[in-house]
């Protein structure tokens, strides 16, 4: 006759030893050709710091460190994949350049990154978007395998075997009223509005309304084309921003 009661301690022990981990996006490894294209699009330099959010087996982190000699951090919630990635980094002899953090991508501090790589989902990218815009410095590049950022349109897009790679450059916050003095003593003003890297608005020269013909924002650099008179050539201004303040202005007259 079977016992009326069963000891459940063994089952509880098994559950404690193998806790369930709920990942926001399933792990799907990025093939080597795609890794190459993502790193090429990131345009890595010797001073870059790369964070891979949802780093999986660490192949993007390890490849970036090995090929470019830069510091790289992988963020991954699955401890088994973190352990495997650390072993692979040691095998590739880049363990002194890389680190893998067992943490939630929505909570980790990635503000020091100059490059972010992603292979998540559209919905996850959109959830991350407010933090990426608020916490990353202007000019930081974000590279996503396959998935987009909702209504934040990418600055650049490549195709590899029918799969898209997207690149965004984090824009400075330039909305508002700005004023500066031109080379001949004129006082210029612009009142700008902004949605991500798209900028538009109104312009004045010595308090007279003039034509703001073009505005292009890339990172912390804003190029404005202003025409003060229909018969004169437009003037190109390049405005540089730092920590939310206008720092320097360059001026050049454009040829028709």
Image (cartoon, rainbow, N blue to C red):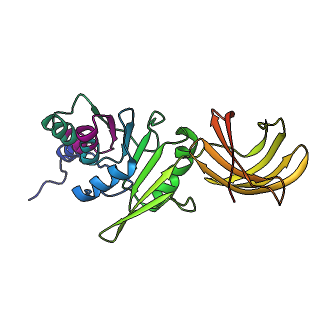
Farthest right residue? 207
Residue 23 visible somewhere in the drawing = no
Q: Is residue 74 left or right of residue 200?
A: left
Residue, x 29% and y 49% (percent of image)?
20
Residue, x 19% and y 51% (percent of image)?
5
Residue 140, relative to residue 127: is it above or below? above
The span shown in magenta is 64-83
Residue 7, relative to residue 122: is it above or below? above
Q: Is residue 52 left or right of residue 59?
A: right
Count the marks: how many? 0
Question: Observer-nearest residue: 171 or 127?
Answer: 171
Percent across and percent down for residue 65 are 27, 38
* Corner quadrant of residue 229: bottom right
The verdict on residue 214 being magenta is: no
Question: Observer-nearest residue: 239 or 193?
Answer: 239
Residue 205 visible somewhere in the drawing = yes
Farthest bottom residue? 162
Residue, x 51% and y 59% (percent of image)?
154
Question: Observer-nearest residue: 27 or 151?
Answer: 151
Percent across and percent down for residue 90 are 16, 34
Farthest left residue? 1
Q: Is residue 138 left or right of residue 245?
A: left
The verdict on residue 75 being magenta is: yes
Residue, x 52% and y 45% (percent of image)?
132
> The C terminus appears in which quarter of the rendering?
bottom right
Percent across and percent down for residue 106 are 46, 44
């Amino acid at each position: 006759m079977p016992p009326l009661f069963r000891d459940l301690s063994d089952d509880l022990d098994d559950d404690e030893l193998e806790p369930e981990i709920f990942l926001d996006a399933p792990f799907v490894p990025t093939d080597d050709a795609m890794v190459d294209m993502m790193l090429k699009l990131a345009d890595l330099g010797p001073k870059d710091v790369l964070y891979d959010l949802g780093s999986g087996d660490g192949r993007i982190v390890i490849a970036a460190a090995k090929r470019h000699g830069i510091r790289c951090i992988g963020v991954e919630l699955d401890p088994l994949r973190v352990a495997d990635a650390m072993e692979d980094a040691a095998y590739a002899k880049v363990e002194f350049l890389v680190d893998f953090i067992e943490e939630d991508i929505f909570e980790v501090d990635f503000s020091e990154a100059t490059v972010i790589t992603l292979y998540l989902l559209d919905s996850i990218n959109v959830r991350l978007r407010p933090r990426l815009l608020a916490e990353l410095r202007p000019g930081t590049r974000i590279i996503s395998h396959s998935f987009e950022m909702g209504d934040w349109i990418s600055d650049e897009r490549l195709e590899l075997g029918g799969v898209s790679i997207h690149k965004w450059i984090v824009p400075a916050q330039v909305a508002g009223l700005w004023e500066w003095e031109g080379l001949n003593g004129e006082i210029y003003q612009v009142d700008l509005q902004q949605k991500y890297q798209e900028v538009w608005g109104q312009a004045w020269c010595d308090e007279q309304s003039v034509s703001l013909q073009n505005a292009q924002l890339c990172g912390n650099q804003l190029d404005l084309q202003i025409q003060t008179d229909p018969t004169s050539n437009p003037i190109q201004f390049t405005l540089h921003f730092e920590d939310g303040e206008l720092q320097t202005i360059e001026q050049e007259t454009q040829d028709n």
